[in-house]
Image: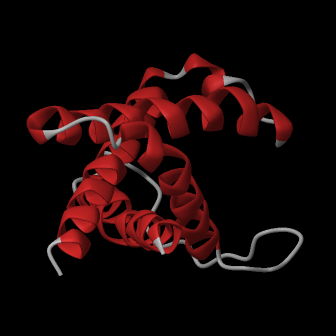
Amino acid sequence: MKIVKWFIAGFVATLVFHQGLFGLLYLTGISPRAPFNLAATEPLGIPQVVSLAFWGGVWAIALAPLLAKFTAARWWSAWIIAGAIGPSAVALFIVFPLKGMAMAGGWDPKLIIGALLLNGAWGLGCAVALRVMKSR
């Protein structure tokens, strides 16, 4: 049952916190791309935002056991830091090159900072979702 809760936390955190911050960045003109991208992914044709939320759930399953040892304020900051660094590093240094893109987006500071901010927000969202589910 823990794994299901972890997945739900990561999935919801992606849709609310990650995409929410992405929306704010878009509305303020900082990001040229809009959130909640419904374009189909290859090869399954799943909307990109759903695929992203799925992987958010998978990341939460991977991180939750590692971060369970932290308590109080350290638990919150651990989720934000691990959320910012883990998914961002994998996306920038593994996923981008696999998709034929330049590593780390060609070392574009805006892209790197954006990834850290969005994924840090996702980590905060996971922490919030897990606390909400724990209190119920």
Q: How many marks?
A: 0
Q: Return the residue nearer the eye: 10 or 66.
A: 66
The single residue placed furthest to the right in the displayed view is: 43
| Residue 93, x across and y down, in percent | 68, 26
**Where residue 61 appears, x then y in whole percent?**
53, 56
Residue 104 placement (x, y as % from top left): 62, 25
**Residue 114 visible, this angle:** no
Q: Quadrant of residue 30?
A: top left
Q: Is residue 101 left or right of residue 47?
A: right
Residue name at image x 38 percent, y 72 percent = 12
Q: Residue at x 22, y 54 (%)?
A: 28
Q: Position of residue 50 (x, y in %)?
A: 58, 75
Extreme residue toward the top, this view: 107
For the C terminus, give its image quadrant.
Answer: bottom left
119 vs 65, nearest the viewer:
65
- The residue that appears at 85% across and 77% down in the rendered structure is 44
Q: Nearer the viewer, residue 79 or 114?
A: 79
Residue 133 higher or lower than 103, as above or below: below
> What's the coloring here?
secondary structure
Residue 19 vs residue 76: left or right? Answer: right
Q: Is residue 15 above or below residue 99?
A: below
Looking at the image, residue 36 lies above or below residue 70: below
Position of 133 relative to 127 (above/below): below
Locate residue 103: give its quadrant. Answer: top right
Relative to 47, 22 lies left or right: left
| Residue at screen point 59% across, 68% down | 54
Asked whether residue 80 appears in the rendered view, the answer is yes
